[in-house]
Image (cartoon, grey):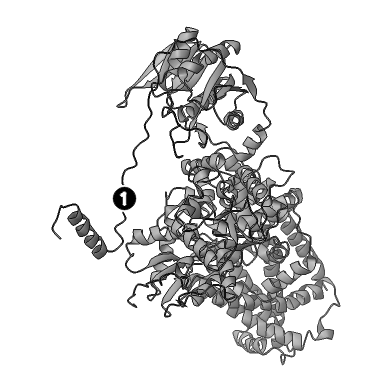
Amino acid sequence: MASTLPLWILVITALALTAWRSRRYAFALANAPAAARFDRPMLRLQGVMVAIGMHRKMLRKPLSGVLHAIIFISFFVLFTATIDAFGSRLFPGFSLAPIGGETWIAALQDIFSVLMLVGVGLALYQRYVLRPARFDGSSGSDAAIIYVLIVLIVASLLLEAAARIAGGADGSWRPVASALAGLLDRAGIPAHQGEELFYWAHVGAILAFLVYIPGSKHRHMFLAAPNIYFRSLEPRGLAPAVPEAREAPGIDSLGQFDWKQQLDLLSCTECGRCQAVCPAYAAGLPLSPKLLITDMRDALAAGPSAAPLVGGVISEETLWACTTCRACMEACPVEIEHLPKIIDMRRHLVDEGRVSPGLQEALSNLTRLGNSMGKPSKMRARWTRELGFPVKDAREEPVDVLWFVGDYASYDPRVQEITRKVAELLTAAGVDFGILFDAERNSGNDVRRAGEEGLFETLAQSNIDEIKACSFNRIMTTDPHSLNALKNDYQHFGATFEVLHYTALLAELIAAGKLDLHVADGARVTYHDPCYLGRYNGGFDAPRELIRAAGYTLHDMPRCRENSFCCGAGGGRIWQGDDGVTERPSENRIREALSLGDVAYFVVACPKDKVMYTAAIDALGVADRLKAVDIAELLVPLTSQALEIPTVETT
Amino acid sequence: MNILVVLRMIPDSAGELQLAEDGRSIDREWLDFQLNDFDDHALEEAILLKEAGGAKVTAVAVGEGTNRVLQMAAARGADEVVALQAEEDAMISSREIAASIAAMARAKSADLVLCGVQSSEDVFGQLAPYVGALLDWPHVSGTNRIVANGAVLRVTQERGAGVAVTYELATPAVLGVQTASKAPRYVSGSKLREASKTPIGRAAPESSGFERSAEIITLRLPVQGGSGENLGGDAETVADRLVSILAAKGLARN
């Protein structure tokens, strides 16, 4: 056929252009440090199937999920048309007809062409009519160009078939194209020339699409699957270790990121789901997880430049705004890992001593005294003095449960009362427990996430040595942050302890009938899932069981469980100032609870939350409508006086 | 330029201070010790001078827990670190240690001795004057900026109400630092861990050579006042509670 040579030239030119436009990424990935992401292929593949085949995360936003699924499936069906279009002319004699190219495949192409247009129509409706805020900062022109190219490809496909039918071909398997054939006829477009015109428009649009892709978010067509396949299979609560090959603890240039971290940048679809759930973004801080990724991606695409990565491409304020709540990673449909990047860049800042005065004070206190408050170690167990009974020293005698109390539960006067309640509950249930007294140090969870790896190692090693010298069966923590460090991060030192949160232990004791409680009369309360208990460690159910066991009715907030909204204190944020914050995440959350209209208690299960939300309730002046109570305060042993629940006016 | 910086360990004021049996000193057995804040600034100023024009910084530390602080000094950029032996469980008296510091300044051929302007155990700020006198070097205290230009120093001193004076003096000199030109830097845990391998020198104390002039006869801890009371969250409870307190104090009729 006469068109074979021109088509070959066109295809080869397009492929060469595509390769040229991809060269920077290819070089960057080829030269990136290694990442161990090749283990457990079946598990990895399974994740890809669920993420893409089932659209698991995509469908959490129903409209987006459905329209994407329509476009996605249509793409695969219409790919047969692409094969046909190129195959038939590049390799004369090639045809899909023997396997149904002119019958059932033709029918599918015909129907899915329309579906594709419906999908694009929904996308247009979403982007230009609904205009969700998560698209703020995404490239509008990129999306528009893609829509135009898709519509061109599909329209030319339909019109080419229509022209063929108008020229006498059988149209019985192509109802839509047949209908269009009538229109072409009436428009007086000659069938043969029309077919040729639409054919070249079709292949031209496809090749334009191909050439366009390397510089577009549509790279995700090729990169989403591998990016999901090579996702991290480590426990969610394990912050990435500093690779031994790296000279300094942190990262200050894009090239130092391993290939998976760089692949993340290229895979971003700019969907903004991360931005929509980010507490720092909602607070008005200069952090959007999406822009964090796309800014680095654009820097990668631009090649080496004079601007430094840390403090240049990504500002220091952006890095310090993150609470490490992990909502962004939970929301990302293509498994981009925002946090490891932030932590690695923070490590660089910390190593350079570029920290805010508040953070410097906390870290210096932690270095000197093992707690962020600057209190002497010897006052760590001071809260036990007001208990009516002695607490065992786990360093001196064997215990069943080693209780790792944590800084806030030990030192903060607002939380000590709750710590004592937990001690009383354990005693009422006959639990044999002990604590480390002045030998306990901050677990280092947030120290590590603030980028202070060296101090984290010092704190962790100290705790591990003390814990290993004790005789115990299990560890219980008050603080979800401590839970995460002991359970996950300490694995870096080969320390694997059985660690559980106090809510899990208490739920277990109640289930075993060891704890008899006053039962309330079904008053409605809401519950805030702490990031490091829920999203990080899957502890969603035990707190809810406790609330039920204590006789309360749980009215969950819209953002609950995996979608819980961070209080704003994590990842070292609690040590930073509020500069630039327009709405504190904790106040945003309290407003959400108030909007439920019928809850008296805002139940928490993290010492920091008690502090954060009590302050937020005071700041909003709603102490008469809502009270932040720790879950331990709801659990009242029969031997004590029952709790009086305030009455709430239902709104 | 050779700079000698003095780092004194003082009782952590956040700790619970208790009197020793003799009633004239603090029971130091259960106390945590921390670097005197002004000395921290002196160290920072020394490192800043080193970074600005090159210098060899020797840090000498006195008191309990000096190893940790000397490692920190090394991590921040001190070239040599020395622990000065001192009498255990005793306050760090400037009169007592001045001779040792002066001797060390000579031994290290120091051009400049920096120390904090005062410490909680020397509120008179005597260390810099003593050392200056013993060495017969000029001294200025209360500095908040030191600039070195060869052997000539420009030293700014805070005089309150925003008034600042700048002195020019030639080395060798002794300076009591109020604040460094920049806030003391943060030194990361990984740098501290690296610095933990730094060899720490030991120095034996010199006899002070001073006659006793005065001695502490008694030490008093602050009397614990009544603590605050939270009157509760809602207006009615607060009002009730206020009325009953005022009535109990005879300030209002119930």
Q: Residues within 10 Å of mark 1 (few under 14, many from 20)?
A: few
Query: How far across and how far down the image is residue A154, in percent?
Result: 65, 77
The answer to which of A146 and A400 lies nearer the viewer is A400
Which residue shows up at 52% across the image and 22% down it?
B6
* Residue found at the far right of this picture: A93
Q: Position of residue B1 (x, y in %)?
A: 57, 15
Tell me what residue is drawn at x 71 percent, y 70 percent: A47
Left or right: A514 as drawn, with respect to A110: left
On screen, B226 above or below B89?
below
Residue A52 falls in image quadrant: bottom right
Which chain's residue wears label 1? B
Q: Amino acid at mark 1?
A: Gly
- Give the side of residue B13 with respect to residue A461, left or right: left
Q: Quadrant of residue A119?
A: bottom right
Q: Is residue A202 visible?
A: yes
Residue A24 visible in the displayed image? no
- Quadrant location of the C terminus of chain A? bottom left
The image shows residue B145, relative to residue B172, as above or below, that is below
Residue labelled with disc 1: B228
**Helix, strand, or loop for circle 1?**
loop
Q: Residue at x 67, y 76 (%)?
A: A54
* Residue drawn 79% across the image and 71% down it: A3
